[in-house]
């Protein structure tokens, strides 16, 4: 170790392979032995493994190297015949002993790494899961699914191995098999279905075959059942997986629309789940063959007011998707009337203009144009009062896509004739954070 008597150097940045600690008022610079450091990152190895060339690397570093498409040893530059990695237990034990020896200087002992799961273990477990499902052995199937879940929790490396081994397709097939009773799920199947739902969420995106199976009548009915259940975790998992399902399956399944609206209206829902639900709704109201009937059903369930509530303090992704859905809802006469009747629609939509993203600004301009036609003098004046005219001018100055530019220009021409009747109020001063929500 190297001692330094200069206190000013305590705050300088440590070089790679060295750590600064203070003992008795003195700066102590701990030098990590060179053979403890990974040749790729120069950081101390936590899980040293040796390649066929005899060079040792940290497992995470060398795995990332191989994932980038490299097939040679980073140090020797020799092409590797095999990518097998042998754990260097002896070196790892030496590193751990060194850490314990220097713990008084703030060096933490590296944990003993778990043995990573292999492709063979995953494939063998998946085969057993399918066999148990086909023979109706629910308890054994549940045990094996939980085993895969535990492997995934151990490390990201295990998750990658599980996914690349095709486990998601097997689990989707088993889910469909245990969902054979549709909406009336048997109690002994409930636990294994819940576990499979939870595991599949981190295996996304699913393969095309997996998405097709998940879109079957049995699987869809089961997911809708979970979507409307009382367990929050299962509801979130079901919502995330419904995003993987083909649009045709969503249209045909009863209860999907009601479940999605209910999910978005939950005050404690995670942002990722809310975005997933909004993305599903966006696809349904924009791309579905029966989009008018579907949109009308969403409007009847009060989606407009729920979207406006989401806009009050939603993050970027939520605001973009909520505005996108609202834009398509305004294509429907009933949806447009519902949006007009809500006093918060124009102030909230205009407030999001230029404040979230280019995409949200595009949706905002489109919504305002659809709501404020020549016959709606009151709405035109209201839009002017919350500052839409100035924001549209700024939008044209900073730049936007051609379609949005055309809509903004048309809207400016429409609003220009009513400027004398409106007393302008800066919309940035409007605060909706303390709005009392119906829930």
Image: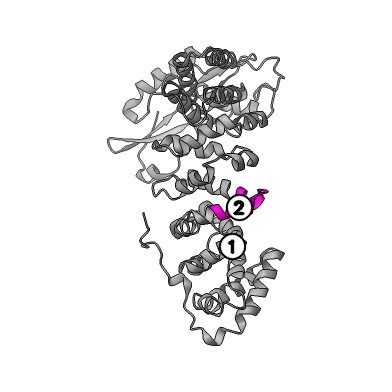
* Vertical placement of residue 162 versus 412, above or below: above
* Vertical placement of residue 158 versus 408, above or below: above
Mark 1 touches mark 2? (CB < 8 Å): no
Q: Secondary structure at mark 1?
A: loop
- Which residue shows up at 51% across the image and 34% down it? 223
Res 235 quadrant in image: top left
* Vertical placement of residue 280 versus 197, above or below: below
Residue 260 x/y as whole percent: 50, 45
Res 327 quadrant in image: bottom right
Residue highlighted by disc 1: 330
* Magenta span: 283-297
**Towards the viewer: 61 or 293:** 293
Res 357 quadrant in image: bottom right
Q: Nearer the viewer, mark 1 or mark 2?
A: 2
Image quadrant holding the C terminus, namely bottom left
Which numbered tag is attached to residue 293? 2
Q: Residues within 10 Å of mark 1 (few under 14, many from 20)?
A: many
**Towards the viewer: 389 or 436:** 436
Q: Secondary structure at mark 2?
A: helix
Residue 41 x/y as whole percent: 56, 31
**Towards the viewer: 259 or 64:** 259
Residue 155 x/y as whole percent: 49, 26
- Between the C-alphas of marks 1 and 2, the distance is 14 Å
Q: Is residue 422 magenta?
A: no
């Amino acid at each position: 170790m190297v001692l330094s008597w200069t206190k000013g150097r305590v705050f300088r940045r440590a070089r790679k392979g060295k750590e600064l600690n203070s003992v008795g008022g003195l700066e102590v610079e701990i030098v990590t032995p060179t053979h403890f450091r990974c040749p790729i990152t120069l950081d101390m190895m936590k899980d040293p493994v040796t390649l066929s060339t005899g060079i040792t690397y940290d497992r995470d570093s060398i795995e990332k190297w191989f994932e980038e498409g490299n097939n040679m040893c980073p140090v020797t530059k020799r092409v590797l015949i095999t990518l097998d990695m042998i754990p260097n237990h002896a070196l790892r034990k030496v590193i751990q002993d060194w850490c314990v020896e220097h713990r008084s200087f703030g060096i933490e002992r590296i944990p003993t790494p778990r043995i990573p799961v292999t492709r063979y273990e995953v494939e063998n477990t998946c085969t057993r899961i399918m066999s148990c499902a086909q023979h109706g052995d629910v308890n054994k199937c549940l045990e094996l699914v939980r085993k895969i879940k535990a492997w995934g929790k151990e490390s990201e490396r295990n998750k990658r191995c599980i996914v690349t081994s095709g486990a998601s397709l097997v689990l989707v097939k088993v889910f469909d098999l245990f969902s054979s009773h549709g909406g009336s799920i048997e109690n002994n199947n409930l636990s294994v279905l819940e576990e499979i739902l939870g595991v599949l969420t981190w295996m996304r995106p699913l393969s095309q075959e997996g998405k097709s199976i998940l879109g079957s009548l049995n699987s869809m009915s089961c997911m809708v059942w979970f979507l409307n259940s009382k367990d929050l975790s299962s509801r979130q998992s079901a919502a995330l997986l419904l995003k993987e399902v083909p649009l045709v399956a969503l249209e045909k399944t009863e209860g999907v629309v009601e479940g999605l609206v209910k999910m978005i209206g939950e005050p404690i829902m995670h942002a990722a789940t809310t975005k997933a639900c909004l993305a599903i709704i966006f696809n349904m109201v924009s791309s579905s063959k029966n989009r008018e009937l579907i949109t009308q059903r969403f409007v009847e369930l009060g989606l407009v007011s729920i979207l406006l509530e989401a806009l009050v303090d939603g993050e970027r992704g939520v605001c973009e998707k909520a505005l996108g859905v609202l834009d398509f809802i305004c294509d429907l006469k009933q949806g447009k009337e519902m949006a007009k009747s809500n006093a918060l629609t124009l102030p909230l939509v205009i407030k999001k203009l230029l404040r979230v993203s280019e995409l949200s600004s595009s949706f905002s301009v489109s919504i305002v144009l659809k709501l404020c036609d020549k016959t709606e003098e009151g709405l035109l004046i209201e839009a002017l009062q919350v500052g839409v005219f100035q924001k549209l001018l700024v939008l044209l100055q900073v730049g936007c896509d051609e379609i949005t530019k055309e809509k903004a220009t048309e809207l400016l021409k429409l609003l220009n004739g009513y400027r004398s009747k409106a007393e302008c109020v800066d919309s940035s001063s409007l605060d909706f954070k303390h709005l009392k929500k119906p829930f």
